[in-house]
Image: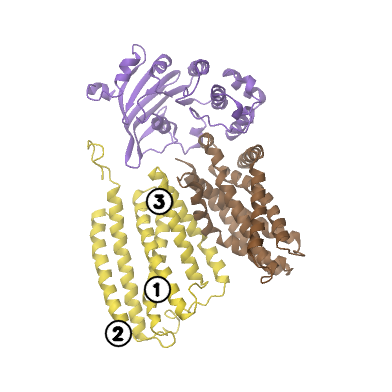
Chain colours: A yellow, B brown, C purple
Amino acid sequence: MKPKSAGTAGCVLAAAGVATILVVHWMVAFWVPTEASMGVVQRIFYVHVPAAWTSFLAFGLAALASAAYLWLEDERADAAAVAAAEGGLVFGALMLTSGPLWAKIAWGTYWEWDPRLTLTLLLWFTYLGYFLVRGSVSDPRKGRRLAAVVAVAGALNIPLIHVSVSWFRSIHPDAVVIKPDGPTLHPDMLATLLVSLAGFTLLFLGLFCLRYSVEVMSRRRPPAGAPPGASS
Amino acid sequence: MRELRWIWLFAAKDLRTELRSGGRLPAMAAFVVLAGFLFAVSLDRTQIPSRSVAAGLLWLVVLFAAIAGAGRTFDLEDRHGAFRHVLLAPVSRRAVFLGKTAANLVLLWLATALAFVAVTAFLGVRSPGALVAHGAVLLPGTVGLAAVGTFFGRVSSHSSLGDTLLPVLALPLLVPVVFFGATATARVFLDRPWPEVAGPVRLLWAFALGALAAGAVLFRHTAED
Amino acid sequence: MTLEGRDLVCDYGPTRALDGVSASAQAGAILAVFGPNGAGKTTLLKALSGERRLDGGRVLFDGVPVSGTDPAWRARVGVVSHRTGLYEKLTVEENLRFFAGLHGQRAADDALRTALNRVGASALAAARVGELSRGQRQRAALARTLLHDPEVVFLDEPFTGLDPDGAALLEAALAELSTGKRIVVLATHDVARGLRLADRFLVLRCGRVALEDAAVGHQAPDVTAAFDATAALAPAEVAG
C-alpha cells in the first residue's frame, strides 16, 4: 500500500475506532446491566478482553511481518512489523494493567498465574527487547534484521510458553462467549463486548496504518542533489 | 561430514581459548558456588522444605551461569576482528552456531555439576535422588539454555547495550526451560518414579531441539553485516 | 581476471556511504583506494568482497555477478585489515590451522610452512598471537590470508600501526602477492606509499569517485588535492 493512502485509511479507521470506543464508554457506564457475582468491577472486562485480543492480533501481525522481512528483505514488511509491534505494546500494557485491577477485586490478588496473562507478559517483554535491539544497533538495517529475528524467535516459543503456563492451575474465567450451545453472557453484555471489540480493532488498525505510513515516509531519502542535513 | 568438522573445529577452538583465558573458569565456579550460598542464606529453611526449593534454585543458578557465559562468547570473536574472517570463510553459519553452542554447553556442564553440589550442600538436601535421573533432566535443559544463550549472545553483541540486553532477550524465551526443568528436578529430589519425570523431560527435549533448529536457521541473519 | 563493481550503493541508515561507485581491478595489478576518513574506502572494499550487502549496483567477477552469501565466492576472497583478526590466546600455527579448516583444508604442515615463509614469519609459528609485536601479527594475518590461496585480496589500511621495518616487510610481501594471477585492492590514507605500490588508483570522496587514473605520473600532493577540492574537478575527471 502507498504510504499516503495508508495514512488516509489510518485516519478514517482511527476516527471510527475512537467514535466506537466513546459509544462503548457510554454503554459501559449507563446501559449494560451489572454482573451479579462480580459486581461493578466486571465492567473492566469490556476493556480488558478487547485489549487482550488487540494485542495478540498486533503481536501476531508483527511476527508475520518480521518473518516476511527476513524472507523478502522488503523494507515495507519491516515498517509494518514496527507499526504492529508498537500497537501490541500499547494494547498489551492496557491488558496487563486492567487484568490485575480486575483480579485484585474478583480474586483477591493482583497477579494470577493465568496462561493468557502470563503469555502476554512474556510477549510484551519480547517486544520490548525487539525495540531495544532496534534502537541500540548503530547500523539501522542490521538493527531491523536483528529485531525481526527476536520477533520470530519469540513467536516460535509461544507453544512451549503456553504449555508451561497451562501447567499452573488456571483460574481464569472460562470462555463465556464462544460456546457450542450459544453464548451464556447476558445479551446486553455480549453486545457491549462486541461493540468494544470492534472499536479496539478499528482503533488498532487505524493506528497501524498511520504508523506504517509515517515509518515508510520517514525512511525515504531526500532527492538526489539535496544538501546533506536536508533529509528529514 | 564437512559440517561436523566445522562444528568440531569451532568448539575445540573456543574451549582451547577458554582454558587459556585463565580466570574465566575459576570465576564461573566461584559465581556458581556463591549464588548457591546466597540463595541458601536468603531462605528461612525452618519454614520451607529444602528439597522443594532446591530444584528451583538449582535451575536459577544454572540459568544465570548460562547467560553470563553466553554474554562473553562473542566478545572473544569480535575483540580483534576474528569473526569477520570466520564469516568470510566458506563455512556455513549453521556450523558456526552449533560449534559455539557446543563449546558453551561443555562449560555449562561444568558449572551445572558444581551448582548441583553447591545447592544440595548449602540447602542440606539429604538423599537427593538418583544422579542418573538428574543427568537425564539437566542434559536437555542445558542444551536449550546453551542454544538460546549463544544465539542471543550474538544478537546482543551487535548492540551498544551489550550484556544488559542479553537477559532481556533470552529470559522470556527461557521460561519453559526453567519451569519444566525445575518441575522435573523437584520430582527427582522427591524420588518420584521416572514416568512422573518423563513428561517435563520430553518437553525439555522439545525445547532443546527446537532451539537448536531455530538457531541454526536464523543465525545467518544475526551474523552478517 | 577482472573484478568490477558497477554503480555500487551502500547505505548506513540515512547516510549514503557509497553513492554509485564504479571500480575495476585487474589480475596481476594493485588497485589503490584513497580518500579522507569517512569517504567510503572500507565500505567499498566490503562491497566488493561481498561482506556488505548492496543497496544498489552489482559486483562482477569476470563478468559474472558474485555475492557474499555464496560460499564459493567467499572461498576466492582474502582480507587483511588493520585489525589482525587472529585469536590472541592461540598460537600462530593454531590460528592458521583453524582458518584453514574453515576453508575446508586439512592444512598440511608444508602448506602452513610455505605460507609463513612467504611473509617471513616461519619463526613465529609456535608463539601466541597475544605475545607478538604489531608487525609480527600483521604478517601472521597475511599468512592466514594466503593459506587458502585467494584470487582476490583486499587490504584495508594494512600499514596502520606498523613500524618502518614491519611496513617494509609488508610492502615486500604485497609486491609478491600481486605478481601472478591475483587481484589486489588496497585501501589506505597513505597516498605516497599507495602510489608507489599500486598500478592504478582511485580517490573516493563522500562516497563518490573523485579521481581515477594510472599511478604512474602522479605525485602524492596532487592526489591529496582531490580529497577536498570538490569544485575544482572537471566533470570528465569525476566520471573517471
Q: Residue at x 39, y 16 (%)?
A: C192
Disc 1 versus disc 3: nearer the observer: 1
Look at the numbered discs 2 and 1 and tell me whether their residues touch, using CB distance below 8 Å.
no
Query: In this view of the protein, which residue sits in the foreground, A142 or C38?
Result: C38
Helix, strand or loop at label 2? It is: helix
Q: Which residue is mark 2?
A: A31
Numbered badge on residue B117: none
For marks 1 and 3, give the CA distance.
Answer: 31 Å
| Image location of residue A180, percent across then percent down | 45, 82
Mark 1 or mark 3: whose residue is earlier in sequence:
1
- Nearer the observer, B7 or C76: B7
Determine whether, in the image, residue A223 is placed left or right of residue B80. Answer: left
Q: Amino acid at mark 3?
A: Tyr
Please say if B88 is above or below B58. above
| Labels 1 and 3 positioned on one and the same chain | yes
Q: Residues within 10 Å of mark 1 (few under 14, many from 20)?
A: many
- Asked whether the viewer can see residue C105, the reply is no
**Residue at label 1?**
A48
Q: Quadrant of the N terminus of chain C?
A: top left
State which quadrant residue B17 falls in: top right
Label 3, on which residue? Answer: A69
Location of the C terminus of chain C (image quadrant): top left
Kind of residue sitting beneath label 2: Trp
Please tell me if label 2 and label 1 are on a single chain. yes
- Binning the other alpha carbons within 10 Å of mark 3 as few (below 14), some (14 to 19) or many (20 upward) gives many
Dot 1 falls on which chain?
Answer: A
Residue at the top extreme, as displayed? C217
Residue B61 lies, with reference to residue C51, above or below; the image says: below
